[in-house]
Amino acid sequence: MVIATPSTSSEISRTPQRARERSVDIIIILYEQGIEEITSLEYFLNSPTVHGVYIRDNSSHPHKVSATLHNRDLIHYRWMGGNVGLPKAYNNAVAECDAPFICIMDDDTAVPDDFLEKASAYFIDEPAVYLPLVRTQRELISPHLQFGYRVQVIADGDFSDATHMSGINSGMILARDVFTTVRYDESLFLDEVDHELMVRVHEHGIPIIVMDDIVLHQSFSYDSNNMQADIHRFHIWKQDTRTYYAMFGKDGKRAASIRIRARRRNLIRKYKSLRFLFI
């Protein structure tokens, strides 16, 4: 299904493209795990559509690329010297990519065996963003509708609202030329990074294409019962929430304060500790 943002007035072209013109670079950000633990790495290293796999490692120490990995020469690995945040790691990788298309992947997202082969059939001549369907065990989490800072799940499979269409990074494919217009906002660290990028995509009238016959499955593994870890995580989330919501003026700032207070209350109840009052 093709969706053009309202400000895109030109007719979308579907000129057939040669193999090089359809090739894809993959970007994956690591954090405190080995390269071989990336869920879909084997698929990407064996896909004829993949030009390169750009791994940026935000771990506290570097990891080695195993000599036994098939097609390991496709891997472009860089340790970032510690956790520099998602946007900086993404932008660093984008700057090195030279395939016409770039796919942003999570390390824990499973992809079907024909993911990129199906996706390449959607590619158009002009710079665009391509969204697969991403599901958890409970619901469809991408694409979704975005109304300012509010996000609404699409429960009925209707992807026709081009004005508010948005999605998350998992499996998102962007024409490399999109990054001549937008980039990941390095004032953020971890949260709302993809939402902020999609706001910019809409502002510049970049077409958004929903690949509604491609389904990826994501597992959320974060379920901490470690208070110190949750203190650290809350601090990052609070800062990113304030930064992102401030884009939407006074209403956004009020909404951020409400969300922060609610999450703080939940953490105080969870740990029966007032330490979260001082974060």
Image: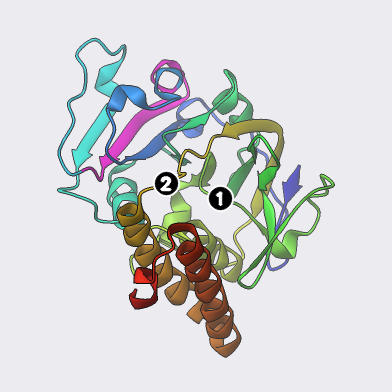
Residue drawn at (34%, 48%) of the image: 94
- Vertical side of 89 occupied by 258: above or below: below
Q: Is residue 28 left or right of residue 34?
A: right
Which amino acid type corresponds to the residue marked 2 in the rendered image?
Answer: Ser
Range of residues picked out in magenta = 44-59
Residue 107: give x, y in percent of width and height. Answer: 41, 34
Residue drawn 47% across and 62% down? 267
Element marked by disc 1: loop
Q: Which mark is residue 66?
A: none
Quarter the N terminus occupies: top right
Task: Indicate the position of residue 161 as horizontal and vertical percent values.
Answer: 78, 59
Please provide percent x and percent y for residue 67.
19, 13
Q: Quadrant of the C terminus?
A: bottom left
Q: Quadrant of residue 254?
A: bottom right
Disc ID at residue 224: 2
Give the mark nearer the N terminus: 1 vs 2: 1
Residue kind at label 1, given as amino acid type: Ile
Q: Residue at x 38, y 71 (%)?
A: 274
Nearer-the-camera pick, 108 or 87:
108
Determine which residue is flagged by label 1. Answer: 168
* Residue situated furthest front in the rendering: 272
